[in-house]
Image: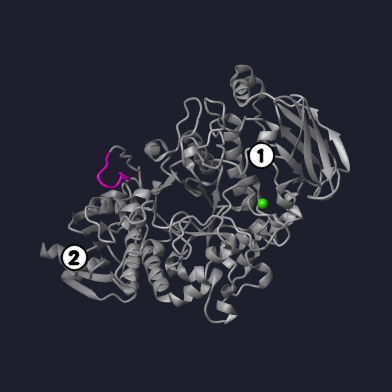
Amino acid sequence: MRTAAEWKAYYSTEEFQKKFLYDGRDLGATCTEEGTSFLLWSPAADSVTLNLYRSGDEGEAFERIPMRQRQQGVWEWCVEEELHGIYYDFTLKMDGETIRSADPYAKACGLNGRRSMAVNLRKTDPEGWAQDQAPEKPRENIIYELHVKEFSWDASGGFPEKYRGKYKAFTCQDTTLYQDGIHPTGIRYLQELGVTYVQLMPSYDYGSVNEDGDPEEFNWGYDPVNYNVPEGSYATDSRHGEVRIREMKEMIQALHQAGFRVIMDVVYNHTYSLDSWFQRTAPWYFYRVNQDGKASNGSACGNDFASERAMCGKYILESVLYWTEEYHIDGFRFDLMGLLDVELMNQIRRSLDIKYGKGEKILFGEPWAAQETAMESRAVPALKKNLSLLDKNVGIFCDNTRDAIKGSSVHIEERGFVSGRSGLEEDIFESAAAWCVRSTKGQTQEMPEAKAPSQIVTYVSSHDNQTLWDKLTDTVSLQERMRINRMTAALYMTCQGTLFFLSGEEFARTKNGHDNTYNAPISLNRLDWEQAYRERELVKFYQGLIGLRKQLPGLCDKSESANRRFSRITKKNGIVSYMLDNEKKGENSRWKNLFVIYNSKRRTEQIPLPGVEWELLCDAKRSDLWKAPARVAKRVSVEPISVLVLGQTENGQEEREQNL
Ligand code: CA
């Protein structure tokens, strides 16, 4: 076999670029009532045989068919027969070796994704699928990060036994705590909470969990095997390839019906193993290679997908489009987006905009990589420092905001603004305005300014690192810890970026201090619905904040001019406050202006108010004051470690103007 460096040289030749790049969209198996076609891109193969099987994991091939070589490195076999439910793989002869591979372009597969399956996708549609539609675009993106298995695994959730940990659990709309018929869990709970997007952690086929193994096996799933096929361990039957497809669609349909849009977490930056279907059918084409001839490892998972290469970029783009078309996915969260290239991200943005309308599908990602990567040619990585090159509607997780508010995620003992660290006032204001992601602690070497709040995802918890509750250990009492948690929530929920949080943050979710539970037992990772009940006061606080946020168009403004809404800004001595123009054309709100105060001090502060009269919308303990607001005038006292949100009605403003 040729070495990685030799393959790389071969793919870089002009001859290869001219002769072997394929531009069709029909790779993989396409199966309808009229017939079935199999197309594989394998430019260096000497011959390819298609093997057909009755089962996805057992028995020998019942037919072995030599495939015909076409132009552009494509091998093909077609038949006027609907081979729905037939499993297949390929035997390739290349460089004197014989290689078995499943289909990197597969849309269905058998157990553990080992063999691919021909599927007539229309036969996998649940009833009413053609009419399935996402709910109308919400006024604010409030994203709830959820793992399919964590959601319904715990017995306290009251889900039917056979659906626990499965896609199907999402179709149960009326679950209650231990089935007590009183306290909502699951979907109904999320509706009451008020989030607008559910983000599913990786739900394509991944490799770290045996689909036929112990049902307790758990992994986050950041180890893709078949990018265009749902994961099998979440299906009620992982052996029959059509079941996981239908059940994933049922889940999305149920979420749409319940009023949520659905985001998928996608990990196009690497594959479970370097010995993947990509590698077996086109050695080293899909992976980056270092100067020393070894696999690039910017993902810290053993390999990096070469997004900047034509057929890789095309693969990722078409995969994204496939998930939107076939599964009605409403947005994507790109894992280690910093390993992908800017041009590809912008191309994905453009393609989705053309097809679905500008900004209709939400796109964002992690603007970093785990390590250095060997990106080729002049490609520019989608890192934070290149934010200005990304489309206005490609967002990034803002780690600066995260760390300024609660303290470093890496250095656990480091405090943030809410835990009393001084000197972060400027960072906190920038977090609120979501327009600049300057490094914290006064380091200014990289100061990419966001074009608009649409580029910023504001968050303080995600599956990575400690949960918010676990991070806030350095407190004098449980009471103070709870107070800091409330302040943290109120602070980031009054920032202009897209709001994002890890499921359970709202009920003080704990993982006992563990900061990386990707393969920890499900008993540590599962959502504990009993705790959601125990911490219902905190849940109620989040509910109130979310309810308030949806009525504040000034904070929801994601446009380039959003930062012009700020005035009367104070940033000193542990206090940040600002006034915000809350009027937006075409959107009604009771309040023309907002006044927001963040008091991180350990004592009560008296703050003078501009104008005469304000309504109290949220304070240290209650975030639902806006439902029947009390009035305050001239000055207001702000409790220690708390956020105060005030609103000014038209009358209040008139009085103010008279008094000026
Ligand atoms: Ca799997």
Q: Amino acid at mark 1?
A: Ser
SS at mark 1? loop
Looking at the rendering, the stretch of residues picked out in magenta corresponds to: 436-444
What residue is shown at x 45% (from left), y 77% (from top)? 534
In the rendered structure, the answer to whether residue 581 lies left or right of residue 309 reads left
Q: Quadrant of the N terminus?
A: top right
Residue type marked 2: Glu
Q: Residues within 10 Å of mark 2 (few under 14, many from 20)?
A: some
- Corner quadrant of residue 613: bottom left
State the image coordinates of residue 166 (x, y, percent, origin top left).
64, 63
Q: Is the residue marked by circle 1 packed among few (<14), some (14-19), or many (20+) residues within 10 Å?
A: many
- Find disc 1 in the rendering and name its residue: 276
Residue 494 is at least partly visible in this image: yes
Residue 443 within the magenta-colored segment of the rendering: yes
Q: CA distance from mark 2 to mark 1?
A: 67 Å
**Quarter of the figure that contains the C terminus:** bottom left
Earlier sequence position, callout 2 versus callout 1:
1
**Helix, strand or loop for disc 2:** helix
Residue 110 spot, x, y in % from top left: 75, 50
In percent of width and height, residue 61 lies at 86, 43
Q: Is residue 194 magenta?
A: no
Residue 654: mark in rendering: 2
In the rendered image, residue 411, in percent from the top left (x then y), is placed at 36, 52
* Picture colour scheme: one colour
Kindly report the secondary structure that dominates the magenta region of the rendered protein. Answer: loop
* Residue farthest along the right direction in this orientation: 62
Mark drawn on residue 31: none
The correct choice, above or below, for 581 with respect to 178 in the image is above
In the rendered structure, the answer to whether residue 470 lies left or right of residue 135 reads left
